[in-house]
Image: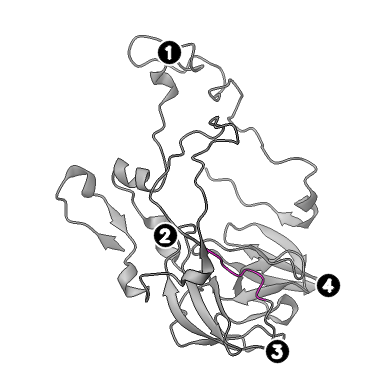
Amino acid sequence: MKKYNPTSPSRRQLTGINYRSVLTAAEPFKPLTRKIRANSGRNNRGVITMRHQGSGNRKLYREVDFVQKKINVPARVKTIEYDPYRTAFIALVLYKDGDRRYVLAPKDLKVGDQIVVSESAPLKTGNRLKIKNIPVGYFVHNVEIRSGGGGRLARSAGSYAEVLAHDGGLTDLRMSSKEIRKVSSESWASVGQVSNPDWNLVNIGKAGRSRWLGIRPTVRGSAMNPVDHPYGGGEGAQLRGTKRPKTIWGKVTGGHKTRHKRKWSNKWIIQRRPKVR
């Protein structure tokens, strides 16, 4: 982690990732980038439908290959790079046929390492295999839910899925959130944990840094008028005044489940992640 000198009250607690010790390129590979228009939480009519979103710094989107369809074609890692659209680092790999792609960089992947997508690939960090060929106890990331559908699970910084068991064409995985779920054993997954595991230890430190990230301020409901929020009004600091916690639109939030009872993926979840007390 990178710490800053307390030259001001806002920088006293400020921390960040020490990119110099990990990243090897300052500029992205231009053919694999494109501009995405920032809507700042607005819909096609310009109406704000998602609050607390601003423009933030300008950024280019890196086209990351989550499918990795080049089977049995070895690739060598050219650079480890920063991606402004995700928490994990990405790696630019050069395939033996001359093609270049961005892939998610697992932890401890280095420039010059060779990776391959193959059913018989060695169990080495960065290699991609079918889950049925990965022994119990290994950490995997960028896991497909259906074979050929591209990685969907364990893609953010520091996340992983631990292989628990293989049975009847299905594999049990324990996610980093401690949720246990099943996926098809024919699905593909990459060996290792996603890079940048210290991301969740970053202290934003000051309001300006949140604005750089495109996050606008949040006003407390108790600081509003009664017409604007269920908690509004009163002289000075007041109690909430409602029996249950509510949103700005009066909807109850405390302990209210937001997941649909008949969501299609419920049958694949064996054990939900534990509640945070």
Q: Secondary structure at mark 1?
A: loop
Question: Magenta includes 213?
Answer: no
Q: Are marks 1 and 2 in contact (CB under 8 Å)?
A: no
Q: Is residue 163 above or below residue 178?
A: below
Badge 1 density bin: few <14, some 14–19, many ≥20, Cα 10 Å: few
Residue 109 image offset from top left, x and y in percent: 47, 79
Closer to the eye: label 3 or 4: 3
Location of residue 152 by image quarter = bottom right
Mark 2 or mark 1, which is nearer the start of the sequence?
A: 2
Residue 169's disc is 4
Q: Secondary structure at mark 4?
A: loop
Q: Are marks 3 and 2 in contact (CB under 8 Å)?
A: no
Residue 225's disc is 1
- What's the CA distance linking mark 3 and mark 4? 18 Å
Tag 3: amino acid: Ser
Residue 190 image offset from top left, x and y in percent: 62, 75
Residue position marked by numbered label 2 in the rendering: 199
The residue under the point 70% across, 89% down is 120
Mark 1 or mark 3, which is nearer the start of the sequence?
A: 3
Chain part drawn in magenta:
62-68
Q: Are marks 4 and 1 in contact (CB under 8 Å)?
A: no
Mark 1 or mark 4, which is nearer the start of the sequence?
A: 4
Q: Is residue 52 above or below residue 136?
A: above
- What's the CA distance linking mark 3 and mark 1? 65 Å
Q: Is residue 52 above or below residue 249?
A: below
